[in-house]
Image (cartoon, grey):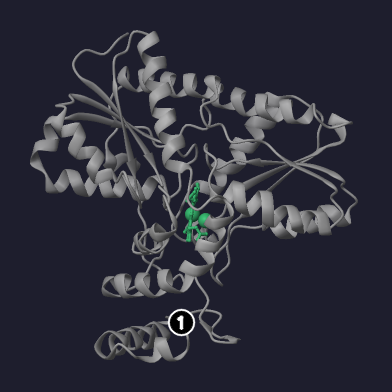
Amino acid sequence: MVAMGRVGVLLLNLGGPDNLEDVRPFLFNLFADPEIIRLPFSWMQKPLAWLISTMRAKKSQENYRQIGGGSPLRHITEAQAQALQETLKQQGQEANIYVGMRYWHPFTEEAIAHVKRDRIEHLVILPLYPQFSISTSGSSFRLLEQLWQDDAKLNQLEYTVIPSWYQEPGYLQAMADLIDQELQRFDHPDAVHIFFSAHGVPSSYVTEAGDPYQQEIEHCTDLIMQTLNRPNAHTLAYQSRVGPVEWLQPYTEDALKELGNQGVKDLLVVPISFVSEHIETLQEVDIEYREIAEEAGIHNFQRVPALNTHPIFIESLATLVVDALNTPPRTFAEVVRPSKKVKMYPQERWEWGMTTAAEVWNGRLAMIGFLALVLELISGQGPLHFVGLL
Ligand SMILES: C=CC1=C(C)c2cc3[nH]c(cc4nc(cc5[nH]c(cc1n2)c(C)c5CCC(=O)O)C(CCC(=O)O)=C4C)c(C)c3C=C
Ligand SMILES: [Fe+2]
Ligand SMILES: [Fe+2]
């Protein structure tokens, strides 16, 4: 059934720096998010975000430089929006598509301003993360919930949230298709080890805060293997760990070494937590993990491309939208998981010149960092300058 009234679809995504100058402010926005670094005191959030983004900027910029000087995420997401609009139209469903990024342009706040400007009556909120995590979809839902609380006008809008959608048959089919296509390029397709690499999160998100992410990733992997219906061996591992705390295991780099030691020669990486090419496929997998794999004796290391605008994938998004318009709406309150502020999660090492110091930040260390920051701001020549961080 086709929904009446003005329909909008809000696609949520992370966002990425468009150029190298954007890297530091992008990182600041990311680390200023309490769903990314969970602190006991909210007043610490911004100073700490400032410190970590400042310390990480150079390394991160170097990674973005290796993939052409910026993230392709904005262009790809806009192309997905365009393709989704056309597919919906073919199915008789007119809809405006909006892109709302969490940490960079076009920001979620801008997207909501456009939704209001266009006087949308029914809004489907669709994160471009197939699986739910507190740190991704959860963070965007929390932000939206806040925008709704701050703006009474938004309450006239009928909205519905799709929390996660990795079970959608079209999505699974598109993933299986991409894998199958890449397998055919190997001399012995059945002998290829299929290596699912998911973006990691700190383990405590799952064990302490109740993030369903790990369970959804595991289930998703099983469903893709069932859809693929081939005899290949497969592994699931977690990539992109930052900081010294424990993240979901096994880590991608360890699992690759292990497989290399076991004599695996042909390996196909399947990025599984994200539907677009981005820095972690183009730089981390294609450059860093390839090097680790080759050193471990995996001579034929290939990767499945991201879905981007794969037609079966875009059709599955259209199906999700149409289904959401035809079922009772789901509110933010139903989909935002409770998150206890349990611990401080250090995401970055302190790199004081030559020494790698604290393994885990504690409150005291954060306090020292904060004082350093204050001194820095007052004098312009404070301790951060002194140790070469700025
Ligand atoms: C489902 C995917 C993602 C999860 C889960 C996730 C959690 C998470 N990420 C960080 C820290 C960083 N993420 C960064 C970039 C980044 N993260 C994702 C996806 C997930 N993150 C994507 C797609 C991207 C890249 C966007 C792009 O520019 O193409 C970065 C910045 C890049 C870098 O410096 O390495 C950081 C830092 C944490 C701490 C976390 C869970 C708590
Ligand atoms: Fe991330
Ligand atoms: Fe990351």
Secondary element under disc 1, as helix, strand or loop, is loop
Residue visible at 40% across and 60% down in the picture: 21
Q: Is residue 232 above or below residue 359?
A: above
Residue 260: give x, y in percent of width and height: 85, 54
With 195 as the anchor, is 264 left or right in this view?
Answer: right
Q: Residues within 10 Å of mark 1 (few under 14, many from 20)?
A: some
Is 176 or 69 nearer to us in this picture? 69
Q: Report the residue that reaches farthest toward the left.
A: 152
Instruction: Name the image quarter holding the C terminus.
Output: bottom left
Q: Is residue 320 above or below residue 126?
A: above
With 370 as the anchor, is 358 left or right in this view?
Answer: right
Task: Kindly tell me whether residue 33 is visible in this rendering.
Answer: no
Is 157 or 355 nearer to us in this picture? 355
Residue 288: give x, y in percent of width and height: 68, 57
With 26 as the anchor, is 257 left or right in this view?
Answer: right
Residue 7: give x, y in percent of width and height: 24, 21
Instruction: Name the image quarter holding the N terminus.
Output: top left
The residue under label 1 is: 389
Residue visible at 26% across and 74% down in the picture: 43
**Residue type at the position of mark 1:** Leu
Residue visible at 54% across and 67% down in the picture: 59
Residue visible at 28% across and 41% down in the picture: 332
Task: Kindly tell me whether residue 125 is visible in this rendering.
Answer: yes
Q: Is residue 12 above or below residue 70?
A: above
For the residue with label 1, is its CB less than 8 Å from the closest atom of ligand 1?
no
Is 214 or 97 nearer to us in this picture? 97
Q: How many marks?
A: 1
Residue 75: give x, y in percent of width and height: 43, 37
